[in-house]
Image (cartoon, rainbow, N blue to C red):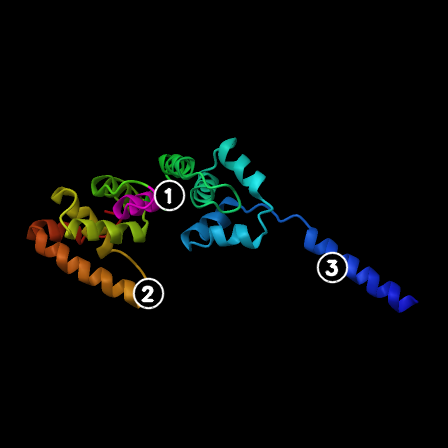
Amino acid sequence: MLSLLFVFSCEKAVAAEELKAVQLYSQDALIRMIEKNEHLDRVVTDRCQLVQDIEAQAEVLKIPAYQFLWGDMLAWGVCVEPAPERGVNFMKEAGMQGLPSALEQLGRYYAQGKLVQKDQEKAVVYLREAGSLGNLQAQIQLAELFIDGHGSPYDYEDAYHWLYNAVTDDKAVHKKIAKYLQQLEALMHPRAVRRAKRPLDT
């Protein structure tokens, strides 16, 4: 009898643990998830328990990382009914508040024509802003657009400057950066290249 009660108590404890509310992510933790592109997977892993909290953080408190998360959820219908237009608008709000990941994703979407109409010039604007805030993926994509003939030659120096000073332990990314630096250099005046090789803090 005692063993049966013990088993029953253990089963109840496990069930209670499973039903325990998932803690809301801190903004720093959420930004790290976004940078690794794990944010939507995490919401699904947490069994969509935080949808109302995420919505409140985005729509009422207007926290940029949550605006981006909520926008991505709406855009792709993750734990909510799909609403791509609203989703992109929330991403833009996050971008306007200076969230580099939001600016990078918007730039990528405009470059690829994903959810929005393809517009390379808009892509350059978003990627340039994200690049200026230190987003390496945006800096790489911006260089790609410049090499393909989009954007202004006046911006090549900044793109070269950011990539020249980039730090990464990813060998494939390192090789890509070296290739793009070489291609950008071919499009630039030697004086501009010399200026672009200055350290980041000057």
- How crowded pointer 3 is (Cα within 10 Å; few <14, some 14-19, many 20+) is rated as few
Is label 3 or label 2 in front? 3
Which badge, 2 or 1, comes first in the chain's sequence? 1
- In the rendering, at what x and y percent does residue 79 appear? 53, 46
From which residue to which does the magenta span run? Answer: 104-115
Give the label on residue 46, or none: none
* Residue in front for this viewpoint, 120 or 128: 120
* 101 falls in the magenta region: no
Q: Mark 1 sits on what residue?
A: 102
Q: Looking at numbered disc 2 in the image, what kind of residue is underneath it?
A: Asp
**Quadrant location of residue 181?**
bottom left
* Residue in front for this viewpoint, 110 or 107: 110
- In the rendering, at what x and y percent does residue 144 appear? 20, 53
- In the rendering, at what x and y percent does residue 162 appear? 24, 51
Quick check: 163 left or right of 59? left
- In the rendering, at what x and y percent does residue 83 appear? 44, 38
Q: Mark 3 sits on what residue?
A: 14
Q: What residue appears at the point 23 percent right and 55 percent down from the top-left corner?
A: 163
